[in-house]
Amino acid sequence: MDSSLYTPKGKGASLVKEVVDTINGLGIFANDHKFLCRVAWVESKYGEEPGTHRSGYHGGIWQVDKIGYRETVIQQGLKKYWDKINATLGIDWTETKWEDLEKPLYSGLAARLFLARISAPIPTDLPSQAQYWKTYYNTSAGKGTVQKFIDDVQHATGCAV
């Protein structure tokens, strides 16, 4: 496995694709219809956006806030995912820290685990994904809008296309 997946503050389209491919390769998450890639693009332009790795913030490429990350560690309904992540990648998710999300693989895993808590399936089409992102990921607390998600993805490169 590529060590850049574990390099703090990594960035770039090819790295995000590798993270997403690694996560999808675990075979434990439902098809996300490019949603994880699209979130990485909308949230941080694959980590290239200034401010992605700002001081005191450790959410990484997927911009997973500390509260959201905490949900991925304490929700017992995620145990089957934790077990597979540990068995396959050697990462004991319950022992991770928010600061670990500066590593691209950890940020991607946190985002995917966060989404796995949601009973509603990830939609297949862009407008529905934009609404899903705003409802469950960016939330009312976030500055993003449904239209911004759509506009960003329409101008995306890499795996978000």
Image (cartoon, rainbow, N blue to C red):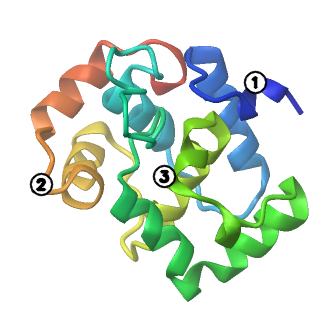
Query: Residue 111: which disc?
Result: 3
Question: Looking at the image, is mark 1 or mark 3 nearer the viewer?
Answer: 1
- Quarter of the rendering occupied by the N terminus: top right
Which of the 4 quarters of the picture holds residue 55? top left
Three-letter residue code for mark 2: Ala
Query: Residue 141: which disc?
Result: 2
The vertical placement of 120 against 26, above or below, is below
The reply, left or right, for residue 154 in relation to residue 57 is left
Query: Residue 117: which disc?
Result: none
Give the Cα separation between the discs numbered 2 and 3.
17 Å
User: Which of marks 3 and 1 precedes in the sequence?
Assistant: 1
The vertical placement of 73 against 149, above or below, is below
Give the Cα separation between the discs numbered 2 and 1.
32 Å
- Quarter of the rendering occupied by the C terminus: top left
Nearer to us in this view, 154 or 136 = 136
Position of residue 119 measured from the top left corner of the image (x, y, whole percent)? 40, 77
In the image, what residue occupies the spot 32% across and 22% down?
Answer: 51
Which of the 4 quarters of the picture holds residue 13? top right
Three-letter residue code for mark 3: Ala
Secondary structure category for the residue under label 2: loop
Nearer to us in this view, 91 or 27 = 91
Secondary structure category for the residue under label 1: helix
Report if the CB atoms under discs 2 and 3 are less than 8 Å apart.
no
The vertical placement of 128 against 1, above or below, is below
Residue under numbered circle 1: 4
Position of residue 158 measured from the top left corner of the image (x, y, whole percent)? 53, 15
